[in-house]
Image: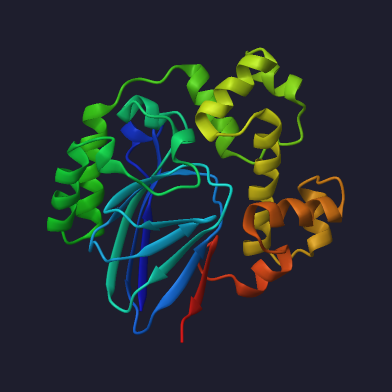
């Protein structure tokens, strides 16, 4: 059984937070969950502290009580035990992590780093979130914590967030993006590396992949139509790019997709 909730942030946090979410599960049998790259920065709380083993590439982790997800470029495989689990998370804009916690997302890509090692107050917050029993109460609590840490964002940071979060502008050249964001191409690449772990060209390709992922998940467009809509060079380029980030072909993802975009589940016997 699974229940999920998603809500937008209050207006005061709209330049910092994209969404709050919660997933509650009670698996009758072991399940392997594969989460393919989603193109977002998240702080995630494992509120039941279930002993969950995760693997990113060739590295094995025991999932911490709280961790940060950066701009992953590899799938995360999680072995979910047959017991109750509750995950609560916040999706942040790319520049927010630095302002809130003085850390950058590039250090948290393709790994499961314990957030309490970076920010000691997170341990107390984990306990407080666990003491609240509804999604709305947890959103209110975390919103208060973030508001207390909030500093104003300048227009350039907001422009960066809009560029990274959206699918638009993925067909621009590096020079065009640099001009749009008022940076030199070299400065732009350094800025994007700090935010996403990817240079400008890689970020543009990643945006195309994310656009394609959502079209595969939510529409019935053919793979040829999706490749054309996202302006990949050709079908082969689309297939290669998708498989690079997910280890799956686009067709395999569509066949195995769940209700949650980017999440695949397989029962373990």
- State which quadrant residue 85 falls in: bottom left
Residue 225, position in %: x, y?
82, 58
Q: Residue furthest bottom?
A: 269
Q: How is the image coloured?
A: rainbow
Judge whether 78 appears above or below 155 on screen: below
- State which quadrant residue 47 falls in: bottom left
Q: Residue furthest right?
A: 234
Judge whether 182 appears above or below 93 on screen: above
Q: How many marks overall?
A: 0
Judge whether 102 appears above or below 204 on screen: above
Decide if residue 239 is in sight here. yes
Depth order, front residue of 56/58: 58
Looking at the image, which residue is at 54% across and 34% down?
196
Judge whether 46 appears above or below 143 on screen: below
Depth order, front residue of 31/132: 31
- Left or right: residue 126 compared with residue 249: left
Looking at the image, which residue is at 46% across and 82% down?
268
Residue 211, position in %: x, y?
66, 49
- Where, quadrant-wise, is the N terminus in this rendering? bottom left
Residue 245, position in %: x, y?
64, 52
Residue 70, position in %: x, y?
47, 42
- Left or right: residue 112 compared with residue 184: left
Looking at the image, which residue is at 69% across and 17% down?
185
Decide if residue 169 is in sight here. no
Depth order, front residue of 63/17: 63
- Left or right: residue 84 compared with residue 7: left
Depth order, front residue of 166/98: 98
């Amino acid at each position: 059984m699974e229940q999920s909730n998603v809500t937008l942030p209050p207006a005061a946090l709209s330049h910092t937070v994209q969404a709050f979410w919660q997933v509650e599960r009670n698996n009758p049998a072991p399940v392997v969950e594969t989460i393919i790259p989603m193109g977002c920065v998240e702080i995630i709380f494992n509120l039941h502290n279930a002993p969950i083993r995760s693997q990113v590439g060739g590295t094995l982790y025991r999932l911490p009580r709280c961790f940060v997800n950066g701009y992953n470029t590899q799938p995360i495989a999680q072995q979910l035990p047959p017991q109750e689990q509750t995950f609560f998370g916040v999706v942040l804009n790319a520049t927010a992590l630095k302002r809130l916690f003085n850390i950058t997302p590039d250090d948290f890509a393709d790994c499961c780093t314990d957030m309490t090692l970076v920010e000691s107050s997170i341990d107390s917050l984990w306990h407080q979130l666990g003491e609240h029993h509804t999604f709305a109460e947890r959103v209110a609590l975390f919103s208060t914590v973030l508001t207390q840490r909030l500093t104003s964002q300048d227009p350039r940071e907001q422009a960066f967030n809009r560029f990274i979060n959206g699918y638009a502008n993925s067909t621009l050249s590096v020079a065009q993006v640099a001009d749009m964001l008022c940076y030199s191409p070299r400065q732009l690449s350094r800025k994007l590396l700090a935010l996403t772990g990817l240079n400008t060209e890689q970020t543009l390709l990643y945006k195309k992949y994310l656009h394609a992922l959502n079209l595969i998940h939510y529409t019935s467009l053919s793979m040829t139509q999706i490749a054309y809509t996202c302006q990949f060079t050709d079908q082969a380029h689309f297939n290669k790019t998708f498989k690079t980030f997910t280890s799956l072909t686009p067709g395999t993802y569509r066949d195995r997709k769940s209700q949650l975009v980017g999440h695949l589940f397989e029962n373990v016997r």
